[in-house]
Image (cartoon, rainbow, N blue to C red):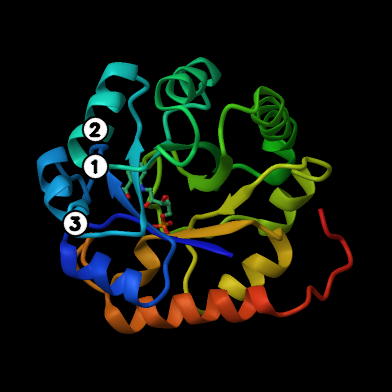
Amino acid sequence: MWIKICGNTNLDDCLLAAELGADAVGFIFAHGKRLVTAERVAAITSQLPGLEKIGVFTTLDYDTIVRTVEEAGLTGVQMHGGPDYTLSERLRAYFGDAERCSVIQVLPWWTDRTADQQRSQFTAAAREVAEDGSADAMLIDSRTAQQTGGTGIALDWAAAHAALRGLNYRVIAAGGLHAGNVADAIEMMQPWGVDISSGVETGTPGRKDPARLQAFIEAARNAAARPLASADIR
Ligand SMILES: O=C(O)c1ccccc1NCC(=O)[C@H](O)[C@H](O)COP(=O)(O)O
């Protein structure tokens, strides 16, 4: 199970995430409570060996993304403004393989719409990401009319899983996860990875709570090690 801790703003939280066994840390280059600059992130990533460093973008501007990846020392891009297949392909062509820079396409799950209202559009978008093939994974995240990401709201994992059925592609589950619900999310969605931000914070957005961080990573690792109760393995 690939585990990403998102919305970081300081080195200490990233070092702790690495020590506790996270695979990736994320930084938000989009307006909101956890916005960071490339300069600030460069000071963090230069002291973080061996961990994936993912930049989260709502912009679809190719030049801005490439420049930020290079200035901030990132190893991956999470595209919250799309999906945009042309941009994904251009980033893949520029950076080469995922070793240099992975590309994650975000598919929104609208928490203010029912599963029936969004299923067909969601499934069509997921199929397009899979058929296009230029992204390394698709990340399913809660979206509201007000917030593009970092909502802290859980989505309907079973409905999302059903809408993704038959797709042979890496899926990352996100949106409102925490130590108490990640096992259910893993059981119901059967993702390749999980991503969290708000659920490992207590007060200030962008500051991670060590106890919550540890509890989340342990819960995700334990859940991933258990055989699935459901026989429905994608
Ligand atoms: O966190 C933000 O402020 C943000 C703003 C715009 C786009 C994405 C943003 N965050 C992305 C994430 O932190 C995570 O990838 C994901 O949304 C999970 O967040 P959470 O529900 O808080 O666990």
Residue assigned mark 3: 9
Q: Which mark is residue 70?
A: 2
- Residue in the image at 83% along x and 42% along y: 166
Q: Residues within 10 Å of mark 2 (few under 14, many from 20)?
A: few
Mark-to-mark CA distance, 1 and 2: 5 Å
Helix, strand, or loop for circle 3? loop
Closer-to-camera residue (221/185): 221
Q: Which mark is residue 219?
A: none
Q: Residues within 10 Å of mark 3 (few under 14, many from 20)?
A: many
Left/right placement of residue 167 relative to residue 107 reads right
**For the residues carrying marks 3 and 2, which lies nearer the camera in this image?**
2
- Residue in the image at 50% along x and 33% along y: 97
Left/right placement of residue 28 relative to residue 97 reads left
Q: Amino acid at mark 2?
A: Glu
- Give x and y (percent) for residue 192: 63, 56
- Give x and y (percent) for residue 128: 68, 25
The answer to whether residue 44 is seen in the rendering is yes
Q: Are the residues at dot 1 and dot 2 in contact (C-beta closer than 8 Å)?
A: yes
**For the residues carrying marks 1 and 3, which lies nearer the camera in this image?**
1
Q: Amino acid at mark 1?
A: Gly
From this view, report whether residue 130 is shown above or below residue 116. Answer: above
Q: Amino acid at mark 3?
A: Thr
From this view, report whether residue 3 is shown above or below residue 91. Answer: below
Q: Earlier in the sequence, mark 1 or mark 3?
A: 3
Residue assigned mark 1: 73
Helix, strand, or loop for circle 1? loop
Mark-to-mark CA distance, 3 and 2: 18 Å
Mark-to-mark CA distance, 1 and 3: 14 Å
The answer to whether residue 110 is seen in the rendering is no
Q: Earlier in the sequence, mark 3 or mark 2?
A: 3
